[in-house]
Image (cartoon, rainbow, N blue to C red):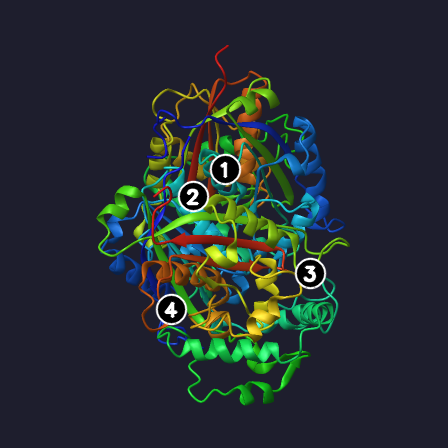
Amino acid sequence: MSKEPVAVVGIGQTKHVAARRDVSIAGLVREAAGRALEDAELTWADVDAVVIGKAPDFFEGVMMPELYLADALGAVGKPMLRVHTAGSVGGSTALVAANLVAARVHGTVLTLAFEKQSESNAMWGLSLPIPFQQPLLAGAGGFFAPHVRAYMRRTGAPDTVGSLVAYKDRRNALKNPYAHLHEHDITLEKVQASPMLWDPIRYSETCPSSDGACAMVLTDRAGAARAPRPPAWMLGGAMRSEPTLFAGKDAVSPQAGKDCAADVYRQAGIADPRRDIDAVEMYVPFSWYEPMWLENLGFADEGEGWKLTEAGVTELDGDLPVNMSGGVLSTNPIGASGMIRFAEAALQARGQAGEHQVEGARKVLGHAYGGGSQFFSMWLVGSEPPDA
Amino acid sequence: MTSEASPGRREIAVVAFAQSDTLRSTAELSEVEMLMPVLHDVLAQTGLKTADIGFTCSGSCDYLAGRAFSFTLALDGVGAWPPISESHVETDGAWALYEAWTKLLSGDADTALVYSYGKSSPGSLRDVLTRQLDPYYVAPLWPDSVALAALQAQALIDAGDTDERELAAIGARSRTTDNPRAQLKGPVPQGDYLVRPLRRGDCPPIGDGAAAVILAAGERARELCERPAWIRGIDHRIEAHSLGVRDLTDSPSARLAAERAGAFERPVDTAELHAPFTSQEVVLRKALGLGDSTRINPSGGALAANPMMAAGLARIGEAAVRIHRGESDRALAHATSGPCLQQNLVAVLEGDPR
């Protein structure tokens, strides 16, 4: 039994900012969804189902907010499914929505992810209370800093690599009108002089807290034929999970990430990701995760990822651009961050990424991860349909 | 589109079900410890191991545990090594089963493990559930789940759809069950009013519990189960959130889901309804067109045990088990989410012809 090909025909984002005090949560999500429908030239009535994702409900203090958001997203009378897979949720949500089309359960699905982080404090929302966790493990940075240290020790990477990534991503963000941080006076020296937060992670090498939403319209072959603008086609997609903590876990390069990438490459017929993939939107909340994921995703041999970064390969005009949009380092509405990666990959494949478009991008990877580097979701999208 | 048995669509069945006892308090157990025996039980029924499962999906809700990402540690109990293909819904496990069903439909997997769990005991459930209401206009008033259900019950009585005597009979019938996992069984006094017109006996017990199901496609299902419970259709629909724009005496979303799941094509002999309040059974019987020939909630339903986030999945499991045992040929299973039956899922299960 063959699966229905899945096309991305509409993409919408909000302008991500630290605090959207002018809109409610419903107003925020409706803005992104409306833009995605506009892009697809469809109306709410054309949508068969809604799949929504976000990170912990505690960030906004609303339990199962999809119930309250049903009206705002035109879901009344339709199926509405809520996904939550920690930081990877934006990606997983898109994949669950895509599967509804692939399985021919629905023809056109609206998928959306959001976070309105100004409603709370993510730093402490992510710090589990004692007795669930040891004290002083504040926020995600406290959890991931030791893993970055381990990477540096393992590979001998010079301690300048992290600031190169941050400097690049913040410059890329200047070309993306939806990015949260637009630091027009950014310099490498400023990044390197920023305060140390969780050694070796500096302030300018961390992601901001953003309010924002991202939406996509996914549809089948018939829907794609009616689309007003070029669609992006899903060539492969997968999720993988492994336990949070156990003796065999490689926190620097988790097996679940490797397996997830391998599954996507197999589906998409990618033999050599470094050669066959044109650009990557990867989930880099702390700058050092770029070289770490370059290895985990098979773009570099083990211990070699930082060399690609250092050589400028991942720059916007490099041989393998990474995070053309400015990435999570420039925009981080947590629950939406994974979907933004997926959507930005699709924008590139459609040739619709504007100033941060990579010339001739045909196959682009979107990547997300979450939890204690244990949940992974990825998709590869292309400008041509599968089997074409 | 979800329902009509389209030619060429894969046949998918529930092949195993397990659940924990539902207990008022499980302070001595972590969520993982509560879940582990259920996972072992459901896997043992089929002889499958974690590594044999094609897709895993779970349902739970952080607000019950009172901490973010509570589901991440439950994954450790699954034993997700080598890494597994896995997902999670922040709602009742019935919706996790729906996600797994679509995954099997697309051919990406032949088997799926679905589990869900919830501990209501760490907090005050009536207060906690107010947090799922509109956060700007309604939640600040703290209207609790019993008060909202009482509004619905009063609307039904005012419409002449039921009376307090019938509601009491529904509670009594539900608790006349031999389900060993039920929290309340046997004669329970109808008790005083909690919120008029609902008395204690019209309301579900508050409990902690877990449930798990294994799904399999086609021939794999026949290998794993003597009489698989085939999912002939499954669909879910949501209504407006605001109670002010809904007719609380009706459930158009349950009716539509049932129609799309094919429930009205032939009568069902059994219905497992997720109706936490006696009055909600009245609404659902009407919306689903269930007559006297259908046996309602032989398991006792949510009035006998209502583990949050697991009670809906348990309805599908209970219906499936009756088909496995040959006690039902065609059953309807229902799950709900949100205040006053806002969101509803309906599955139609059938056994092989006997």
Q: Earlier in the sequence, mark 2 or mark 3?
A: 2
Q: Position of residue A125 (x, y in %)?
A: 59, 68
Residue type marked 2 = Asn
Residue A375 visible in the current orientation: yes
Residue type marked 3 = Ala
- Measured along the vertical axis of the image, is residue A344 above or below residue B44? below
The residue that mark 4 highlights is A24
- Measured along the vertical axis of the image, is residue B333 above or below residue A239? above
Residue B132 visible in the current orientation: no
The answer to whether marks 2 and 3 mark residues whose Cβ atoms lie closer than 8 Å is no
The answer to whether marks 2 and 1 mark residues whose Cβ atoms lie closer than 8 Å is yes
Instruction: Name the quadrant containing residue A363.
Output: bottom left
The answer to whether marks 2 and 4 mark residues whose Cβ atoms lie closer than 8 Å is no
Residue type marked 1 = Asp
The residue that mark 2 highlights is A99
Q: Is residue A75 left or right of residue B62?
A: left
Q: Secondary structure at mark 4?
A: loop
